[in-house]
């Protein structure tokens, strides 16, 4: 448990911001691999190890999340928004796990070596099968769109909490110290 329930622990904050940068990089690398053929080999060489790094970090992040409760959402947050927040976090975790595993499986099914760096390849995790490769390639693309949409929704919600509600939810992950800002009763301010 966190000693101060008003913020995420240091491990959660570091992993959150590190993985946010890595995932945004990965989304741009993925688009670049499709759009700029001259950069494709270089981008693929970046895409594979970055995807595996995300997979390893999300496992550490999940472990940390299960051991350290996140701070509570504001009590005045509508129930549907709280439910959406919890659901979107678990969708993000699912996508962060699924994307690299599907990518690794896709390359395995295609018979492609999964080169991490010169002299080190990952083993195949599914048998070579062109039909499976095609299905996994489509799944990888669909998951990428889902991840992009979920990241945009997550970022939008974070900015809503920062700029509109001003309730300390963003600061709980950004700063990690202090407590949430208590929302004042707006009807009392009108007096």
Image: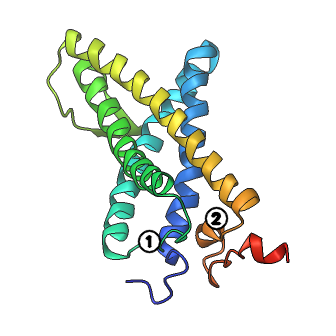
Q: Nearer the viewer, residue 125 or 168?
A: 168
* Mark 2 closeness class: few <14, some 14–19, many ≥20 residues within 10 Å: many
Residue sitting at x 63%, y 78%:
180
- Name the element at disc 2: helix
User: Where is residue 88 drawn, in percent x and y?
Assistant: 44, 48
Toward the left, the furthest residue is 127
Q: Position of residue 91 (x, y in %)?
A: 38, 45
Q: Secondary structure at mark 1?
A: loop
Q: Residue furthest top?
A: 131
- Reply above or below: 34 against 96: above
Q: Using the image, determine if residue 79 lies above or below residue 34.
A: below
Task: Compare residues 107 and 76 and report the one nearer the observer.
Answer: 76
Q: Does residue 137 appear to the left or right of 186 in the view shown?
A: left
Q: Position of residue 144 (x, y in %)?
A: 46, 29
In front of the other: 94 or 188: 188
Q: What colouring does the structure picture have? A: rainbow
Residue bearing mark 2: 170
Report, in whole angstroms, how far the alpha carbon at label 2 lies from the one at label 1. 12 Å
* Image quadrant occupied by the C terminus: bottom right
Q: In the image as oriented, which residue stretches furthest toward the bottom?
A: 3
- Residue beneath the point at 37% across and 51% down: 90
Using the rendered view, name the quadrant where residue 174 is placed. bottom right
Identify the residue shown where x is 60% and y is 39%. 152
Q: Which residue is mark 1?
A: 70
Say if residue 46 shows up in the picture.
no
Give x and y (percent) for residue 154.
56, 47
Precedes in sequence: disc 2 or disc 1: 1
> Toward the viewer: 102 or 147?
147
């Amino acid at each position: 448990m966190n000693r101060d329930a008003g913020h995420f622990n240091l491990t959660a904050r570091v992993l959150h911001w590190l993985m946010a940068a890595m995932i945004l990089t990965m989304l741009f690398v993925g688009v670049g691999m499709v759009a700029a053929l001259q950069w494709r080999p270089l981008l693929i060489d970046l895409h594979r190890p970055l995807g595996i790094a995300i997979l390893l970090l999300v496992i550490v992040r999940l472990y940390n999340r299960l051991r350290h409760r996140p701070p509570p959402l504001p009590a005045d947050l509508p129930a549907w928004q709280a439910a959406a927040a919890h659901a979107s976090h678990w969708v993000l975790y699912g996508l962060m796990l699924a994307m690299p595993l599907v990518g690794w499986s896709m390359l395995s099914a295609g018979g492609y070596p999964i080169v991490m760096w010169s002299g080190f390849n990952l083993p195949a995790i599914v048998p070579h099968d062109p039909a499976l490769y095609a299905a996994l390639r489509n799944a990888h693309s669909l998951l990428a769109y889902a991840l992009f949409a979920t990241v945009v929704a997550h970022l939008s919600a974070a900015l809503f909490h920062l700029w509109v509600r001003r309730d300390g939810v963003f600061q709980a992950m950004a700063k990690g110290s202090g407590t949430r800002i208590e929302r004042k009763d707006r009807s009392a301010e009108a007096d």
